Amino acid sequence: DVVMTQSPLSLPVTLGQPASISCKSSQSLVHSDGNIYLNWFQQRPGQSPRRLIYKVSNRDSGVPDRFSGSGSGTDFTLKISRVEAEDVGVYFCLQVLHWPWTFGQGTTVEIK
Amino acid sequence: EVQMVESGGGLVQPGGSLRLSCAASGFTFNIYWMSWVRQAPGKGLEWLANINQDGSEKYYVDSVKGRFTISRDNAKNSLYLQMNNLGAEDTAVYYCAIADRGPIGNWGQGTLVTVSS
């Protein structure tokens, strides 16, 4: 199975400051169709997960533009340009190329 | 508005069975692959199973293969997960999700399954 490794696992951030989460996959996530199948999810406390980003850098409908995704091959990054209080929660990366689809361990974002 | 509502969770004894349902609305259900995903209490996420549009293709993670069966009824816009031979390790919140690699990737709110005597 493809192993997804996130870092850091805990990320204290000051309101209004940027935050960055890394996700590395044990295999390439590049499909023969040219797409890279890496998604990012947010799970706020007490809520179900919500997809933020699909195919590395495409924001889902309604996702604020302070969230951005980048990366290629096996190394990926989720960035929050200016953290707001509502961004507190756990962030997961998910590869959807190789079966079984696999998640990273999760990164907890908290306010300092 | 895209919506998925799971039901059927509850308390079940070890070795028992349970059938989860997911009622979908707000999108054309029969053109999407669908999935079940779970999250054990305080733990990470595990993608369990995918089913294609007409139910002819199914994929399972090894931890549930042979015990869980994913199915769908397109006439009812519904997704199901039959779970047999349940163990304590299956205690989790179970989510229904659209298994789309593109613009639609919604999840339901989840249903809790507790396996305990």
Image (tube, rainbow, N blue to C red):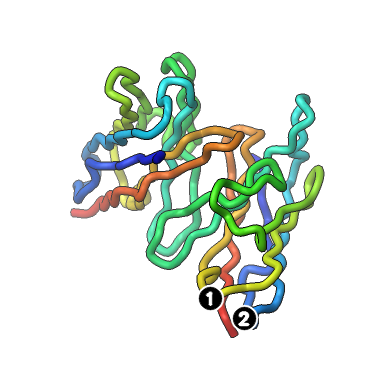
Q: How many marks?
A: 2
Q: Residue at the spot x=43%, y=15% of the render?
A: B54
For residue A96, above or below residue A81: above
Identify the amino acid type marked 1: Ala
Q: Position of residue B117 (x, y in %)?
A: 18, 54
Q: Quadrant of residue B3?
A: top left
Residue B50 pos. (x, y %): 48, 30
Label number found at residue A70: none
Q: Residue at x 40, y 60 (%)?
A: A47
Foreground residue among B81 and A91: A91
Q: Mark 2 to mark 1: distance in Å?
A: 7 Å
The percent position of residue A101, horizontal first and vertical second, equals 58, 39
Chain that bears disc 1: A
Q: In the image shown, does B69 or B100 lie closer to the viewer?
A: B100
Would you name the residue on which mark 2 appears?
A: A15
Name the image quarter holding residue A30.
top right
Tag 1 residue? A85
**Quadrant of the rendering where the C terminus of chain A is positioned:** bottom right
Circle nearer the N terminus (2, 1)? 2
Labelled pair 2, 1 in contact (Cβ < 8 Å):
yes
Chain ID, mark 2: A
Check if mark 2 and mark 1 are on a common chain: yes
Q: Residue at x 68, y 41 (%)?
A: A55
Q: Provide residue A98's location: percent of width, then percent of height.
A: 65, 33
Indicate left or right for A2 with B106 as reference.
right
Secondary structure type for disc 2: loop
At 31% from the left edge and 46% from the top edge, which residue is drawn?
B87
In the picture, the quarter occupied by the N terminus of chain A is top right
Against B18, residue A67 (above or below) is below
Three-letter amino acid code at the position of disc 2: Leu
From this view, report whether residue B75 is shown above or below residue A10. above
Q: Is residue B114 left or right of residue A28?
A: left
